[in-house]
Image (tube, rainbow, N blue to C red):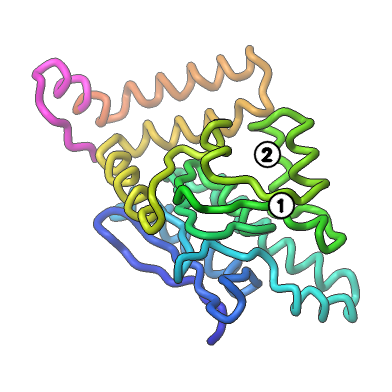
């Protein structure tokens, strides 16, 4: 069976499932391109308010396909650079998508699989899930933004250990460190992600888009620049129709239905 990214809709949530049974849902160019396309569709669709990325058969992803990487060594370096750029376009599309993207991790998330999960806005995992930056174990270095994501969330010494030593880290430990949002029993990661998505779907899409943008920008902005961005987003959202819906519902003690 070929590697593919399965796409299904459940209510207002688009579910993307990594499927590559022969290689433990290893990632590759076909998935990268499909991921970018799916997020472009999600961004433009008024029917989609959130996205969940998960893996088939109780595994998130083993990362890169080592057979493919070994074959790429016989090609010009530009071939692998082009492949990685495909992955990075998917990572960028997650960051730029105005809708919440949630990773639901069961089993292993290794290498680029770990990077992909970290790139999502929220991450939920089974309590027996194992995540590992496995690159150094095969004499490689990170891709998919894994080094950036970890460096934003964890102390440098711990990031260095994860990247250099290739140590496995449990979902429970990452939850304690604030990297994983929810942890639950094996087999419940997708269910947890869908429950989280359902709660987000009930909130104003424009407000969530602003929260996502501001959170992403804060890593690079100084305080004054961030304050300016917060002002601009607040004013824009106050004058959006959803603010009237939300404020009126709160004052009248009713449940809002946002546009």
Which region shows up in magenta? 246-259
Mark nearest the camera among 1 and 2 is 1
Q: Are marks 1 and 2 in contact (CB under 8 Å)?
A: yes
Quarter of the image for the C terminus: give it: top left
Residue at which label 2 appears? 150
Residue shown at the point (62%, 53%) measured from the top left: 114
Residue 1 within the magenta-colored segment of the rendering: no
Q: Is residue 50 rendered to the left or right of residue 142?
A: left
Name the foreground residue: 214 vs 244.
214
Residue at which label 1 appears? 133
Residue 257 within the magenta-colored segment of the rendering: yes
Numbered tag placed on residue 240 in the rendering: none
Q: Position of residue 138 (x, y in %)?
A: 83, 63
Q: Position of residue 239 (x, y in %)?
A: 32, 23
Q: Is residue 254 rendered to the left or right of residue 79?
A: left
Q: Position of residue 223 (x, y in %)?
A: 64, 14
Q: Position of residue 168 (x, y in %)?
A: 67, 50
Name the foreground residue: 34 vs 165.
165
């Amino acid at each position: 069976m070929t590697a593919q990214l399965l796409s299904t809709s459940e209510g207002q949530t688009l579910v993307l499932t990594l499927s590559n049974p022969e290689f433990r849902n290893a990632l590759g160019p076909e998935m990268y391109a499909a991921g970018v396309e799916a997020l472009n569709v999600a961004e433009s669709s008024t029917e989609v308010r959130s996205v969940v990325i998960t893996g088939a058969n109780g595994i998130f992803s083993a990362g890169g396909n080592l057979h493919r990487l070994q074959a790429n060594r016989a090609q010009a370096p530009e071939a692998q650079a082009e492949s990685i750029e495909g992955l990075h376009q998917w990572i960028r599309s997650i960051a730029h998508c105005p809708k919440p993207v949630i990773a639901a991790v069961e089993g292993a998330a290794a290498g680029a699989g770990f990077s992909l999960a970290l790139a999502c806005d929220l991450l939920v995992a089974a309590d027996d899930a194992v995540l590992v930056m496995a690159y150094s174990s095969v004499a490689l270095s990170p891709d998919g933004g894994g080094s950036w994501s970890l460096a934003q969330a964890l102390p440098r010494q711990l990031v260095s250990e994860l990247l250099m030593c290739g140590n496995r880290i449990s979902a429970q430990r990452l939850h304690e460190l604030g990297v994983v949002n929810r942890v639950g029993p094996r087999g419940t990661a997708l269910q947890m992600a869908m429950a989280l998505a359902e709660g987000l779907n009930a909130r104003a899409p424009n407000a969530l888009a602003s929260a996502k943008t501001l959170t992403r920008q804060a890593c690079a902005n100084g305080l004054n620049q961030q304050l300016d961005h917060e002002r601009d987003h607040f004013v824009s959202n106050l004058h959006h129709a959803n603010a009237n819906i939300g404020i009126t519902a709160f004052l009248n003690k009713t449940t809002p239905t946002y546009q």
